[in-house]
Amino acid sequence: MNKILLILFFIGNILNTTTIHGQNNCPLIPCPQSSNRINETFQLSDRCVIVYTEEFEPQAYLLQKELLRYTSIAVSVLLDKETQNPNIICNIIELKKGYKFNTEGYSLKMRAKSITITAGQPSGMINGIMSLIQLTRLSMQQDTFIPVECWEIEDSPLYAWRGFMLDEARHFWGMKKVKQILDWMAFYKLNRFHWHLTDSQGWRIEIKKYPKLALIGGIGNYGEEYTSAQFYTQEEIKEIVSYARERNIHIIPEIDMPGHASAASKAYPEFSGGGSPKYPGYTFNPGKDSVYTYLTDILKEVDALFPSQVIHLGGDEVHYGNQDWNTNKDIQDLMKHEKMKNLKDVENYFFQRMADSLLLIHNKVAAWDEVADSKLSPEQTIVFFWRQNRPEQLQKSLDRKFNIVLCPRLPMYLDYAQDTLQVHGVDWRKFSCNSYQKVYSFSPQDIPVKYPQNCNILGIQANLWTERIETEDRLDYMLFPRIVALAENAWTKEMNKNINSFNVRLKKQFDLYKKDHIYYSDPFAPKETGEPVR
């Protein structure tokens, strides 16, 4: 039997008597499924001790580390069985089979002299820790302690997949910025970081067998063709992956194919399938067996770096640059041999072979919604629905029982303008503004499809493409506060969501952004936070 998973104790005075109020406005984002204010205050100081059971040692030290980082208060850590001080009040809770929370659920019980976080798995414990960290950071620090309002919370997420995608192929941001984004993702209980590492404008991951991919393919970005090569070494990738895992974030790398391959074509043109006048070198060559060996070797190295066992292969917008396939001898021979009718058949053939390569190294295949037309295994494939103007692609994915992540451009593309004052970036006038309110209120029911009773919707995700995002200030401006709206939408059940309550809680986050030097957009006073541009 698991006992209490983590207890944060305080040895000190009881400041108030304990009374429990009804459901109320807990300041946390995302809003918990159940919360009650306790009329007591816990004093966080260096006299506190974290007591943990063995299976939750990493989470105990994460809590210690984060408290020191954000509050400069150093608490001590003790293993549960080493606790002998009779002055410590130890409330033991056994976890039994059939415990009602899922693997990411937790309970947080706070009193003046003790805080108890209970969960069934490390992922749930981390979520409970992040709730405590947020309550602490929202409290006003005194000289040597922080008085933290006490709450009783029982919580678990709506969706298992609560994702954010960052495009580093178009503009490269580096380890420090990525870690900062991971910190905020964990703070708001987002748990999937989709990392777009390769595209036409840049190849951002070191591949040891093919070093020119990074050294040559990493040259340039969206606006400047000849900037020096920027990419992550494999050691840097390992460090970021470890940092994310410590915070219950799984990283899903994307290696785009068969299109969006211009950067790779510059490095190794012998594997290129050509392109079009507007998109030269845009594709890999589906007609060469050596291409499949080359790409499989790449995926094997990627697999060794990312323990998520999911690799995103892109698969989108191939038609932009596959005109040379019409005259490429290798591809024309392939079409005759396999009796293919058109270039879409070639695309599907390529994708099936690369999917088979992934399955052989025990990875699931992730791809954009174009692959709903393929013959990929539904059990081993995750479809990312992004084209809200093509609901039939979602319907096909549902009918074929693919696993699905919803990230429609409207409203889940964060490179789109968030209000009518913005004048740069994607021309929102063709669509509409992707405001934080729209991100907050998005529902699968907004998409005109028929959902089967047991559909495989894993969750939702927001995507930040960076063609027109050149500075960190602009990156922050486009991300905050919409990432907060995303987090509550992905975590909180519909019956517990309330935009007015969210607005009150959101405003309290702005001081935290200032402390972290985040250039955020203030939707309540948009003229006071001007749109940053180079």
Image (cartoon, helix red, strand yellow):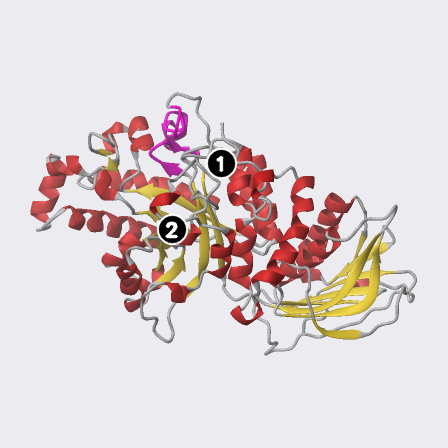
Q: Are marks 1 and 2 in contact (CB under 8 Å)?
A: no
Residue 222 shows in this picture:
yes
Task: Tell me residue 162's x, y (percent).
Answer: 50, 57
Give the extent of the magenta segment. 198-224
Q: Which mark is residue 36?
A: none
The image shows residue 366, relative to residue 108, as above or below, that is above
Identify which residue, 52 or 370, lies in the foreground. 370
- Within 10 Å of the Cα at label 1, are there few (<14), some (14-19), or many (20+) other Cα atoms? some
Q: Which residue shows up at 58% across the image and 56% down it?
A: 189
Q: Nearer the viewer, mark 1 or mark 2?
A: 2
Q: Identify which amino acid the numbered label 1 is placed on.
A: Gln
Per the image, the residue denoted by label 1 is 234
Looking at the image, which is closer to me, 388 or 152?
Answer: 388
- Label 1 – label 2 distance at C-alpha: 32 Å
Tag shown at residue 409? 2
Residue 326 percent across, percent down from the top left? 11, 38
**Residue 309 covered by magenta stretch:** no
Q: Does the magenta portion include 222?
A: yes
Residue 212 versus residue 286 in the image, above or below: above
Q: Main secondary structure of the magenta part?
A: loop
